[in-house]
Amino acid sequence: MQVIYSSIKDIERLYKGLADESRLKIIYLLNELGEACVRDIQQVLRVPQPTVSRHLGYLKRMGLVDNHRRGKWNYYFVVKNQPEIVKHHLQCLRNVSSYRKIFAEEMKGQMEKILPVPKSKRA
């Protein structure tokens, strides 16, 4: 779903969507992992499943994330084909080293729980 940003209200909605701690964390997480299911996001953020689903729904309505089904799980990812204004803001977030450092430190222990174990560390 491509959202058209053609008015001040549309841009305001974008900023409101990104002005939420949980949604910023979800965007960060999806950028780092490429994709994740609700259960994985819930485990990292340590919030109830309905909260994660609500935020993902909001991000999806904004056109920032989308999902695909694999088996019984929906996997969410950041949409690549974005309007320029959205690409610019998401790129700014990725480039701000303090943003990456803050979220990496805060979520590191939780992210490790859902990341696959490297082959070199398997028994």
Image (cartoon, rainbow, N blue to C red):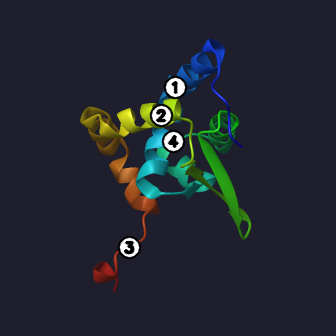
The CA distance from mark 1 to mark 4 is 10 Å
| Residue placed under numbered mark 3 in the picture | 117
How crowded is the residue under tag 2: few (<14 C-alpha within 10 Å), some, or many (20+)? some
Looking at the image, is 47 positioned above or below residue 120? above
Residue positioned 25% across, 37% down in the render: 97
Give x and y (percent) for residue 8.
61, 13
**Pointer 1 or 4: first along the chain:** 1
How crowded is the residue under tag 4: few (<14 C-alpha within 10 Å), some, or many (20+)? many
* Secondary structure of residue under mark 3: loop
Mark in the foreground, 3 or 4: 4
The CA distance from mark 3 to mark 2 is 26 Å
Extreme residue toward the top, this view? 8
| Residue placed under numbered mark 1 in the picture | 20
Q: Amino acid at mark 1?
A: Asp
The CA distance from mark 2 to mark 4 is 5 Å
| Residue placed under numbered mark 4 in the picture | 26
Horizontal relation, residue 47 to residue 88: left or right: right
Horizontal relation, residue 63 to residue 44: left or right: right
**Pointer 3 or 4: first along the chain:** 4
* Secondary structure of residue under mark 1: loop
| Residue placed under numbered mark 2 in the picture | 24
